[in-house]
Amino acid sequence: MDISIYLEPINKLDFTDNNPKKLGNNIIAFTNKNSFPDLNNVDIAIIGVKEDRRALNNKGCGNAPDIVRYYIYNLYTGLWKTKIVDLGNLILGHEVEDTYYALKSCLTDLISSNVLPIIIGGSQDLTLANYLAYENLGQIINFVSIDSKFNLGETHLPTNSENYLSKIITQKPSYLFNYTNIGYQTYFTDQEAIELLKNLFFDACRLGAIRENIENAEPMVRNADMLSVDISSVRYSDAPGNANASPNGFYGEEICQIMRYAGLSDKLTSLGIYEINPSLDNKGITSHLVAQMIWYFIDGFANRKNIIPQRDKTNFIKYLVTIKNQYEIVFYKSNITGQWWMEIPCPTEIINKYERHYMVPCSYKDYQIATNDDIPDRWWMMYQKLI
């Protein structure tokens, strides 16, 4: 498929100088309509989407892609062999749904070609288009969002930045195996919404639980196929460029650490960062932070170890734990990274359908819980999905 028809080139000189050590001079950019970058052997593709017609209370976030691009291009490269292209900005459709279709088409092509897209929005309703790309591919996925709330708005309304999650959950047929929220803040969250997610065996982790130990986020993002970040999940002092920013949220260094975890994940195949509003920003602090988040993501990506226990258990230590003389939980620990996984019993008739999901990333703490004769919440939740 020729995805260039959906994209418009950028002027690279607008974003970078001639320093060969800077990231901008190590990115292959789409700068000429008649010369689209060759995507063979490309690892990561950046796409800007200046769509904010469905942004609730945050108009202006459509201006973010080029501002963020400027800060990305002026960071220095790491010790990477990662091949990155910048495919410019998506041409917006006459209707918002046309934009969704164009973005979905581009992402479908990239993901199927093993190119990881980084979407710079734009408003977070674009996450629906990202999800629909996996639907196009017939791939059942785990979706993780970093957000201060759940975005479970009214489904009868057109898709917007506050109801896109409801649209994804109710989409038929469903290609969503699991949803995880990282960093929700209880005072922004309807208690009925929390109960709904529990009843669906979805996962949600409060901001305080992650900030208490940032490593709690690692197994969650390691289990993601698709990650969506609302910049309002970062506190106002570190990211003022968002109309929905609040006094509490992640610190800049915390969100960068989570982004590096995400980059390290061998499973994750797409990333979107949304709701950056330059018109509300203070000296470009928010756009600069997003650029650094992307830098840390790329740094994680460059250090992937290709460790997937479903494929090869050679470099793993296997642990068997029997709980209450009823459940036997199988744990695997990587000899290379020290990361842990739990194996969820899966009926043989559906194991092929869910072969990417019955081996669940976990932490050493989950193993300790099991050795104390208790069932880890993460194991029980996934077990309920598969029985």
Image (tube, helix red, strand yellow):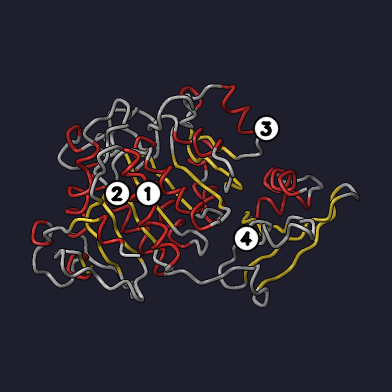
Q: Are marks 2 and 1 in contact (CB under 8 Å)?
A: yes
Q: As drawn, is 126 to the left or to the right of 175?
A: left
Mark 1, Cα crowd under 10 Å, few <14 / some 14-19 / many 20+, is many
Residue to which mark 1 is pinned: 272
Q: Residue 308 at x, y = what percent? A: 59, 68
> Label 3, label 1: how many angstroms apart (C-alpha)?
27 Å
Residue to which mark 3 is pinned: 199
Q: Residue 347 at x, y = what percent? A: 79, 56
Q: Amino acid at mark 4?
A: Arg
> Label 4, label 2: how many angstroms apart (C-alpha)?
27 Å
Sequence order check: which comes first, mark 3 or mark 1? Answer: 3
Sequence order check: which comes first, mark 4 or mark 1? Answer: 1
Q: Residue 45 at x, y = what percent? A: 32, 62
> Label 4, label 1: how many angstroms apart (C-alpha)?
22 Å
> Label 4, label 3: how many angstroms apart (C-alpha)?
23 Å
Q: Amino acid at mark 1?
A: Gly
Q: Nearer the viewer, residue 268 or 133?
A: 133
Mark 3, Cα crowd under 10 Å, few <14 / some 14-19 / many 20+, is few
Residue 87 visible to the viewer: yes
Q: Residue 346 at x, y = what percent? A: 76, 56
Label at residue 120? 2
Label 4 secondary element: loop
Residue to which mark 4 is pinned: 356
The residue located at (52%, 45%) in the rendering is 213
Give the total of numbered labels: 4
Sequence order check: which comes first, mark 4 or mark 3? Answer: 3
